[in-house]
Image: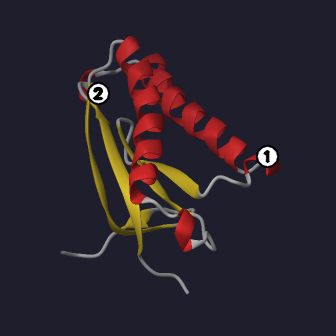
Amino acid sequence: MKQYENMVVIFLDILGSKEMSSFEEKYKIHRIFHESVKTSQDLQDTEEKDHVAYTRKLFSFSDCAYFFFYKYKPNIDESRKDINKLFQVALFNTSLMTLRLLNEGYLIRGGVTYGSAYFDELSFFRPSS
């Protein structure tokens, strides 16, 4: 049954993207985000990474806003679930991408939260407050 799940949600926004008119500039940002996530997801789905307890998903909201969702995989034993470790993994992975963006000269802003949300292969949403 589909339902909300507790997860770490991270939002990143590239500042100044409205002024970017160059395809190459926007494509560079697109590649930085999606290559990083694809590499992690490809590794996560291999047999040697069966021990990894979490899964993550990235959504692009526009050409400059990105949402990352980190949650425990289904059927992970409760004894392996540690919210502090999930935050550490999420923040570490995001910091690598953030540093790459900063090194390329982009300014970013964002936020991190933990709570109920839902995502599938199409998109995401959370309960109304």
Picture coordinates of residue 97 (x, y %)? 45, 28
Residue in view at x 59 percent, y 65 percent: 73
In the rendered view of the protein, which quadrant contains the C terminus?
Answer: bottom left
Res 104 → quadrant: top left
Picture coordinates of residue 56 (x, y %)? 53, 52
Crowd class of label 2 (few under 14; some 14 to 19; many from 20; radius 10 Å): some
Q: Nearer the viewer, residue 99 or 49?
A: 49
In space, the residues marked 1 and 2 are separated at their CA atoms by: 39 Å
In the rendered view of the protein, which quadrant contains the N terminus?
Answer: bottom right
- Residue lying at the far right of the rendered structure: 47
Judge depth for marks 1 and 2 and give the one in front.
1
Q: Amino acid at mark 2?
A: Ser
Picture coordinates of residue 19 (x, y %)? 25, 22
Q: Amino acid at mark 1?
A: Glu
Residue in view at x 44 percent, y 35 percent: 92
Going by the image, does 104 lie left or right of 16? right
Q: Is residue 102 above or below residue 119?
A: above
Picture coordinates of residue 51 (x, y %)? 70, 54
Q: Nearer the viewer, residue 86 or 16?
A: 86
Give the number of the disc on residue 80: none
Residue in view at x 39 percent, y 53 percent: 84
Residue in view at x 32 percent, y 45 percent: 11
Q: Nearer the viewer, residue 21 or 65?
A: 65
Give the number of the disc on residue 48: 1
Q: Nearer the viewer, residue 48 or 121?
A: 48
Crowd class of label 1 (few under 14; some 14 to 19; many from 20; radius 10 Å): few
Residue at mark 2? 17
- Element at badge 1? helix
